[in-house]
Image (cartoon, rainbow, N blue to C red):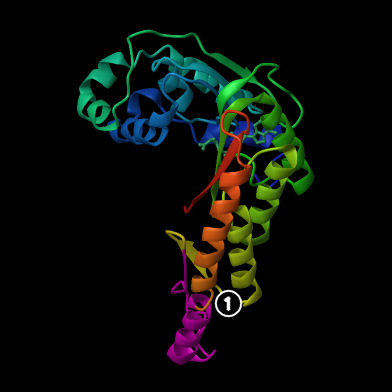
Amino acid sequence: MNIPIDWNNTKEWDLYFEENQVVIKDIANYEIEDSLRYFSAVANRKVWVSGCGLELSPWLFSYLNCEVLATDISKTAIKFQSELLKKNPFKLLNQLQPVLDEIDIEYQTKFIEPQIKVADFRNESPNELFDVVLNNNAIQGLSNSDIEKAAKVFFNATEKGGIMISSTMNVQGEKRTEIENAYVRSGYFIANLEAEQWYRKKLEDTGILYVMILGNPMVPQWDQYQNKGGKEQEEKDKEILRSFRTEYQERLQVNYEKDKETYRPEIDKLAYIIYNTG
Ligand SMILES: C[S@@+](CC[C@H](N)C(=O)[O-])C[C@H]1O[C@@H](n2cnc3c(N)ncnc32)[C@H](O)[C@@H]1O
């Protein structure tokens, strides 16, 4: 079963997770290594994993001195999270000592009982504050008005000077701008926003099919030029996409200087919207 089309349909999420169960004993070392590397910055902090699904992060954080709240609208996902917690990862973590050394996590063999519960992050506030709020691929399918509601809940649950990390899968163009604007309207600070949005609009307005790879617009090889100008047109389009780069970099510099003046460390709450491809 594929991911639900209607993200508000809780039953569909339950069914999706029932059909795509992760068997705990089959969790591979590389999955744990990946999670550890990706989330190493969160060790020892108070963290809310919103829309956690079947992520391993709430489990690992709980064993890495974090105070964890993990929530999801799907009770099947929350049941999985509760079962996972019974599995003590220390044996595994010790086998992964090279990874722990590499990412330089300080951890003690101390387990902090996490809170794991079913909750709708559009309107259920945790009523406590977190250093880090995470949302991994769990808002992009919502309507813009629901994203707006969720952004407010996240902002109110973020400690002063805290951060929101929102990763999105393949979200480009207008939807990405909408997510950023909702976070900013809720009160979050996003670095370099004006320059990034200017660049994105310029690229979008060309009408050329592109994907962002490591911050650069690339023309994908999807046969879109077949019967539409071929290689010659492709080269012209690449040139157009490249043509905004210098002005973008100048704008980034200006934006950076402006952010330095307006950003208030330990007061402003930062939001990072990470672009993942998948
Ligand atoms: C694409 S999955 C991502 C799951 C997980 N974060 C991951 O990266 O593997 C989206 C998740 O968001 C959850 N979700 C969707 N709407 C939600 C809401 N309003 N409140 C809480 N969770 C929600 C779904 O149940 C699902 O677990």
Left or right, 202 with respect to 215, comes to right
Left or right, 27 with respect to 191, comes to left
Q: Is residue 218 above or below residue 157?
A: below
Left or right, 80 with respect to 95, comes to right
Q: Amino acid at mark 1?
A: Ile
Residue occupying the far front of the picture: 261
Cβ of mark 1 under 8 Å from ligand 1: the answer is no
Report which residue position mark 1 lands on.
208
**Is residue 40 shown to the viewer in this render?**
yes
- Magenta span contains residue 222: yes
Left or right, 111 with respect to 147, comes to left
Q: Is residue 51 above or below residue 82?
A: below
* Part of the protein shown in magenta: 216-242
Residue at x 75% of width, y 43% of height? 185
Q: Is residue 139 above or below residue 118?
A: below
Residue at x 27% of width, y 26% of height? 100
Q: Nearer the viewer, residue 79 or 255?
A: 255
